[in-house]
Structures are given as structure tokens and as C-alpha cells.
Amino acid sequence: MTSAYTVTGTKTYARIVLLKEQVRTILRRTTQVSQETLQRLMIGLDRYWIATFLVYAFDNNNLCRGELTFEIDWDEYQLQMSRGKTTVTIDQRWENDTAIEVDEIVRLFNDFSREFNLRTQWRVRYTAAINSDPRKKEEVQRTLGLETAAPINWAGPRQGTSHQIPELPEARVGCYIVDS
């Protein structure tokens, strides 16, 4: 008689470490972000300054045709921490410690960008607390080495979706495109 066994490997991470890994993966797989810039952006995560990471895909007319978003709800993060959920356990479905949802959205965004020969650019949105205080915002931008970007001009109406990551309920990843 032969028995079959399934071996499932798991890894456990500090919650903030796993959030940082998702951001690093998104930016490294979709843009030409430098390691130095990534290190500065991680400061923004450690201090809960950044609410959303965005990657835009622009055409030759500088019109936006795609947007990848990674949103962090810091209130939900604090709630998870207060409940003692300081660590997150993931399994082998998370390839290279990347959430399934992040992996799929990055693939969709990159395929779309390649198909239409679009160039990518990343941006961030600060939390409401940072945006509502001009002095604090200036300090944050100086610390992170960032400046206020020009508004986005869209090529047309966008369509898309976003997904919450079950293991990280404070995180949502989305993709929106102009399909015309």
C-alpha cells in the first residue's frame, strides 16, 4: 500500500516586512526604481507616511493608459497589530514572498504596458495626516527625496479592478487601464 503525502512549507514574517516586500516587488518589476530610492521609500512605510504606491503607464503623447495601485489602510494595519497579529504566515503559493494578487496584477500591468509600448513611472500618495499639514508634507518630501508631481492626463475613461490581499487585509492591489 502506498501513501501520498502533501508537504506544505510556510514562512512567517513581521507584518510590516511583508508589506514592504510587496511594495519592493511592485516597483522593481514595473519600473527602473533604484535601490537607494527604495530604501528611502521604506522609511515612508516605517513611519506610516505613504498610503498608496502607484505605477502609471504613459504613451508617446504623455497620456496615461494604465495604473497599478497598492494601497495600505494604516488604520486596519493598527487594528491587526492591536489584535496581536504582528506576524503573517504565508505558504508556497506566494512565489518569492509575493502575494498571489500582487503577482497577477503586476503581470497584467506589464503585459498591457509591453503590448502598447508604454513607459512607466511610479508615484506615491501620502496619508491624509501628511497631506493636511503643509509643513509636515514638506518635511516628509525632503526626507524621502520626493517632490509634488504634475497631474495625470488620462487617454480616456479607465476600467479595472482591485483586490484585497487575504493575508494582509490592510493591503489592496489594483490595475486600471484605458482600452482604446
Image: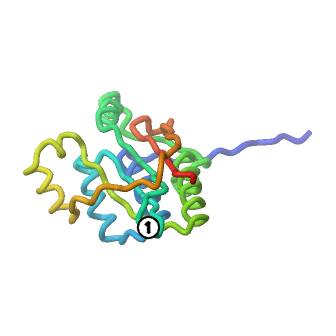
User: Residue 119 placed where, x, y %?
Assistant: 46, 68
Camera-nearest residue between 19 and 142: 142
| The image quarter in which residue 108 lies | bottom right
User: Residue 37 placed where, x, y %?
Assistant: 30, 67
Camera-nearest residue between 6 and 3: 6
User: Residue 92 placed where, x, y %?
Assistant: 61, 49
Quarter occupied by the C terminus: bottom right
The scheme the figure's colours follow is: rainbow
User: Residue 152 placed where, x, y %?
Assistant: 35, 55
Residue under the point 30% across and 57% down: 42
Q: Amino acid at mark 1?
A: Asn
143 shown above or below 170: below
Is 150 displayed left or right of 134 in the figure?
right
28 shown above or below 161: below
| Residue corresponding to mark 1 | 61
Camera-nearest residue between 102 and 31: 31
Which residue in the rendered view is the most extreme toward the right? Answer: 1
Is 24 displayed left or right of 105 in the figure?
left
Secondary structure found at label 1 = loop
Residue under the point 32% across and 30% down: 79
| The image quarter in which residue 150 lies | bottom left
Residue under the point 49% across and 41% down: 89
Quarter occupied by the N terminus: top right
Q: Dot 1: within a 10 Å radius of its alpha carbon, few (fewer than 14), some, or many (20 or more) residues?
A: few
